[in-house]
Image (spheres, rainbow, N blue to C red):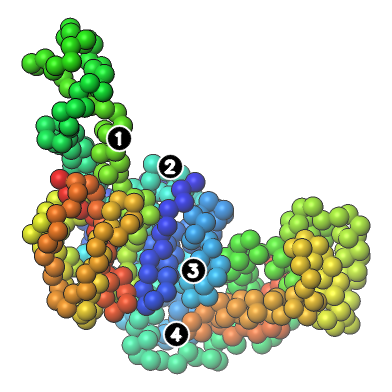
């Protein structure tokens, strides 16, 4: 059944687009609720927003039929249209994000509220997707994030980044970061990594330039996690909490 | 893996279209980022705005189950994505075949130099014709030099990069093209006509099937009458207004 879903969607797009929109009512509801959770819309507006999205989709149907090129799954493509419909409505209203809602679970990190766990799991999925987008840089970036947050570096972290990494260098860095020594300064942490970067990339970068490279990406990760318009309020500290769970996914199963 | 360019351009800079963003999110959901076209991956890596689009959509779909999606129209379909309108594609294929056939006939009837006879070795041996004769026999099937035939066919092959660009949509100005239709036949005197929310002037560029510009015209109205006679072949045309790519189309000259 699922295997046919995309074909059915495409057929309906051609033959009965109104039925297609009916099929996507659940998806519209999920997306609108996500924006309500983020504070973009009020819960009481749910029905109105869904109605707005439906009207917008009906209006855009001819354009969707013309522009959908069949390269992506239709469910993803339509979700993007629904997303933009919500964002346009928000921009039109020029509403301010509800910052209070954005403080979310990170206000009380010790609580075991199930919602908090779900939010963390969601944000870790998003964080994983963000890091994937750095593609060829992602393994170096992961190493730098571990250095930033003083998370122990493993042999496989280094080999994923540089498969030819000399064994002796691996041992040195692994043992130097194994203790989660939070007394290290950033400069000292990146000084541990500097010789390896210069060997792997055949450069002569300073430890500070590597730290700055990583810092720029941390800022971009935070921007992406928070969204535009902002739907979260992550900062360096909350990113650190996410990173710890990111590298220890078993914690999520507890 | 296909590597076609599937970015389009607006507001001076290249950005991913909604379809491209959806495809990237499919890849993230399915763990197939490595199978995306390198240009798309490279663009996303260096473009915070497109990363924002990708992350924003992914965030909404993070908890959605894609594990039973079945074959993907891009990743599992080496022949290309399922098209929304298969009929025009078949029409184009038929037109191309017809155009190649006509081209061969034109060559044989009008362009072939008389002196070519002695250089052409007849190959139609199964018809019982005296193949040693230098003069063509009545009713004999003419033998087309394979090199020339290939050259004619080459002029009618599609450009993967421009086809991708053509399929991509634009996020900004709304543009409707009245003529020529995609794959339509154009000759000297043909009218290019469109309506758009973008303001003139427009830059109309005609490109051959290798992507080389054949002519560029600065226009102050939403139409252009083709004055030049073009060599038989497959062509593309690009319309730019307000520094935004408004349309890419394909046409045939016979």
Along the viewing direction, whichever of A235 and A39 lies nearer the viewer: A235
Give SS at disc 3: helix
Give SS at disc 2: loop
Give SS at disc 4: loop
Label 4: how many residues lie within 10 Å, few (<14), some (14-19) or many (20+)? many
Q: CA distance from mark 2 to mark 4?
A: 41 Å
Give the label, 2 or 4, closer to the camera.
2
| First-in-chain label (3 vs 1) | 3
Along the viewing direction, whichever of A214 and A120 lies nearer the viewer: A214
Residue A137 position, x and y percent, is 65, 64
Name the residue that disc number 1 marks.
B150
Q: CA distance from mark 3 to mark 1?
A: 43 Å
Q: Are marks 3 and 1 in contact (CB under 8 Å)?
A: no
Q: Which mark is residue B78?
A: 2
Say whether residue A134 is visible. yes
Give the label, 3 or 2, closer to the camera.
2
State the image quarter where residue A105 is shown: bottom right
Give the label, 2 or 1, closer to the camera.
1
Give the label, 3 or 1, closer to the camera.
1
Disc 3: which chain? B
């Amino acid at each position: 059944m699922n295997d046919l879903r995309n074909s059915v969607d495409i057929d309906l797009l051609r033959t009965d687009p109104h039925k297609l929109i009916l099929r996507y009512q659940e998806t519209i509801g999920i997306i609108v609720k996500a924006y309500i959770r983020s504070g973009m819309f009020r819960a009481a507006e749910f029905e109105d927003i869904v109605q707005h999205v439906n009207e917008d989709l009906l209006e855009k149907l001819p354009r969707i039929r013309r522009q959908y090129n069949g390269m992506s799954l239709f469910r993803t493509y339509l979700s993007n249209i629904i997303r933009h419909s919500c964002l346009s409505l928000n921009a039109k209203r020029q509403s301010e994000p509800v910052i209070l809602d954005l403080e979310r679970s990170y206000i009380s990190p010790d609580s075991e509220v199930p919602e908090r766990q779900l939010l963390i799991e969601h944000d870790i999925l998003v964080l994983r997707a963000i890091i994937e987008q750095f593609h060829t840089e992602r393994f170096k970036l992961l190493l730098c994030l571990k250095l930033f947050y003083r998370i122990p570096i493993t042999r496989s972290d280094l080999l994923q980044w540089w498969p030819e990494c000399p064994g002796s260098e691996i041992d040195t860095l692994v043992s130097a970061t194994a203790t989660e020594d939070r007394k290290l300064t950033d400069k000292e942490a990146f000084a541990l990594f500097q010789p390896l970067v210069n060997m792997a990339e055949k450069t002569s970068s300073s430890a500070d330039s590597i730290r700055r490279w990583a810092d720029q990406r941390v800022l971009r990760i935070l921007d992406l996690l928070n969204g535009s318009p902002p739907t979260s309020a992550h900062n360096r500290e909350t990113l650190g909490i996410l990173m710890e769970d990111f590298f220890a996914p078993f914690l999520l199963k507890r | 893996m296909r590597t076609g360019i599937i970015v389009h351009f607006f507001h001076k800079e290249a950005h991913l279209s909604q379809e491209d963003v959806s495809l990237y999110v499919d890849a993230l959901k399915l763990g197939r980022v490595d199978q995306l076209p390198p240009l798309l991956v490279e663009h996303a890596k260096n473009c915070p705005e497109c990363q924002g689009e990708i992350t924003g959509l992914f965030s909404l779909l993070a908890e959605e189950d894609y594990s039973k999606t079945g074959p993907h129209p891009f990743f599992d379909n080496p022949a290309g994505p399922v098209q929304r309108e298969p009929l025009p594609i078949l029409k184009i294929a038929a037109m191309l075949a017809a155009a190649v056939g006509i081209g061969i006939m034109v060559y044989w009837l009008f362009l072939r130099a008389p002196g070519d006879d002695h250089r052409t070795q007849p190959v139609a041996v199964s018809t019982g014709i005296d193949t040693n004769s230098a003069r063509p026999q009545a009713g004999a099937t003419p033998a087309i030099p394979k090199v020339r035939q290939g050259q004619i066919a080459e002029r009618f092959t599609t450009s993967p990069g421009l086809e991708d660009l053509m399929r991509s949509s634009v996020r900004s100005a709304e543009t409707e093209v009245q003529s020529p239709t995609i794959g339509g036949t154009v000759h000297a005197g043909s009218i290019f006509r469109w309506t758009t929310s973008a303001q003139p002037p427009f830059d109309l560029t005609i490109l051959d099937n290798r992507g080389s510009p054949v002519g560029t015209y600065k226009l102050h109205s939403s139409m252009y009458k083709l004055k030049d006679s073009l060599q038989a072949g497959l062509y593309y045309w690009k319309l730019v207004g307000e520094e935004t790519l408004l349309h890419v189309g394909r046409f045939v000259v016979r």
